[in-house]
Structures are given as C-alpha cells and as structure tokens.
Image (cartoon, helix red, strand yellow):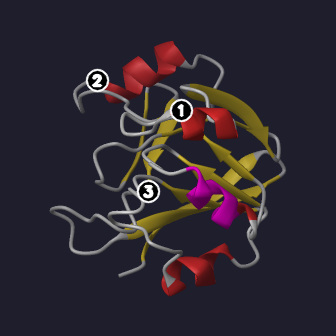
Amino acid sequence: MKVVVLSDTHAPRRWRSCPPRVAGQLRGADLILHAGDVCEAWVLDELAAYAPVRAVLGNNDGPDVAAWGAPPDLEIDVGGLRVAMIHDSGPAARRTARMRRRFPSADLVVFGHSHMPLDQSGDGVRIFNPGSPTDRRRQPNGTIGILSIENGILIKASIVPVT
C-alpha cells in the first residue's frame, strides 16, 4: 500500500494548484494523509482526485476544512497499521513519549506544523512529519512523505523532495 503524506500546504498563498512533482507522487497512491494547515478545503478535493484523503485540522484551517471532514486528531487503520494523526505535536523535547501517551495504541503518529521533515522512533512509537511541499522555511527543499505498508507493517518511510 502506498500512502502519500502531506502537511502545511497553506493554500492559496503557497499552494495555488497541485505542484507537478507532488502530482507525480500522488499518482498510484492508495491513500493520502494531510496533517493540517490545508487552509482551503478545495485542496482536499483536489487531492481526492488522486486517492482517498484523510486530514486533520491545523492551526490555520477554518470552518470549511472542518466541514470537509477534518477533525482535530484522527486514529485510523491503514492496511493493518494503526496510524494517528495530529497537526501540532508540541515541542521536540520528549515528543515520542508525549505522542505515545496521547495515542497509546498507535504504531505511527503523523504530524506537521513545524515544516521540518522528521522520521523518528522512540518510546514504542514512530513519529513522522513530511515537512511542507510548498513552504520549506529553513529546509533545503519542499518535501512530502511516502509510506509503504504491507500486512500491517510499515516497510519504508521516505521523505521525498518535491522542489
């Protein structure tokens, strides 16, 4: 199962339409996860043309994103893998311990907010931030995440540059 993970697209200021290199990664996806700061619900509709989308609310998301169906946090089964998603995971210090307490049954917690890609394990949980495809801030590239899941096991998690 191929899962594409995005966060912090910040439409329309940063995302006017799906960037070609992002679209190339979305083709063939089985699921798209958006970890918040969509900013405009039409982005989720645009992504849904490629694959089913699950999203959470970010601190810059308004009522239209909530009405689209994005809750503040989410726990779902993705191909047998228990995945939780939240926009802001808080400070870096003790983040894995905090995410384990917040989502005790999760195998993987996906988050955004910082725009800094991260793939880290600790305290019995793996945490994953795809960065931002459109607002790289202090990063060398805009990025997204790609997860490969087989039989409930996260086989590979990749941070993919798209700018």
Residue under the image location 34 percent in, 66 percent down:
14
Q: Which corner quadrant of the image does residue 65 belong to? A: top right
Quarter in which the N terminus is drawn: bottom right
- Of badges 3 and 1, the one in the foreground is 1
Q: Position of residue 87 (x, y in %)?
A: 44, 36
Label 2, on which residue? 94
Q: Dot 2, crowdedness within 10 Å: few (<14), some or many (≥20)?
A: few
Q: CA distance from mark 3 to mark 1?
A: 24 Å
Q: Are the two marked residues, 3 and 2, in contact with CB atoms closer than 8 angstroms?
A: no
Name the residue nearer the viewer: 150 or 62: 62
Label 1, on which residue? 63
In this view, 59 is above or below 141: above
- Of badges 3 and 2, the one in the foreground is 3
Q: Which corner quadrant of the image does residue 120 belong to? A: top left
Residue under the image location 45 percent in, 53 percent down:
7
Identified by mark 2, the residue type is: Arg
- Mark 1 secondary-structure assignment: helix
Name the residue nearer the viewer: 116 or 15: 15
In this view, 28 is above or below 107: below
Name the residue nearer the viewer: 85 or 54: 54
